[in-house]
Amino acid sequence: MGFLKPHAERIYALLRIMTGFMFMLHGMQKLFGLFGGVPPGAPPFIVYGAGTIEFVGGVLVLLGLFAGPAAFISSGTMAVAYFMGHVAPNGNILPIVNQGELAALYCFVFLYIAAHGSGIWSVDAARRGTKR
């Protein structure tokens, strides 16, 4: 039994909120040219397709509004990004070698959020009338 067990729901909410926030920033970079601008050489389907999923998915996960479905789509997007952007060009599946740690980590964190749902401190909880 972990010593933080009594705080697990709040820690999960912080994980969901911060993951959504950071993912949203990647979308803002691609769609709006913020934070260093659009990555050089990025094709339009990456800028507009992945950028839209990153921005909208990030906002939905951050707010906890349909976080499960949004996280599932975001997880798939990161799986595709990992294989297209890191494995294919390098021919190496190891994240430490192909510099794909962030994409792989996002993929699995979003998969966890998709399985767990919005949780506390979310729009979904407020809509259900959940007190916690």
Image (cartoon, helix red, strand yellow):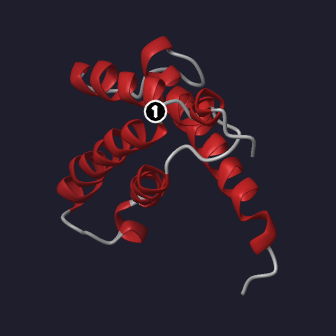
Residue 2 in percent (x, y) is at 74, 82
Q: Residue furthest bottom?
A: 1
Q: Which residue is mark 1?
A: 66
Q: Residue 36: percent from the left, percent from the top?
A: 56, 24
Task: Name which residue type carries label 1.
Answer: Phe
x and y percentages locating residue 105 in the rendered image? 46, 59
Residue at screen point 28% across, 24% down: 49
Residue at the spot 80% in from the left edge and 69% down from the top edge = 6
User: On the image, which quarter does residue 38 sit in?
Assistant: top left
Left or right of 33? Residue 87 is left
Q: Residues within 10 Å of mark 1 (few under 14, many from 20)?
A: some
Side of 107 relative to 77 (left or right): right
86 and 11: which one is in front? Answer: 11
Q: Nearer the viewer, residue 68 or 126?
A: 126
Closest to the observer, 126 or 71: 126
Residue at the image point whose x is 73% and y is 58% from the top? 11
User: Could you tell me which residue is drawn at 43 percent across and 22 percent down?
Assistant: 30
Percent x, y of residue 10: 75, 54
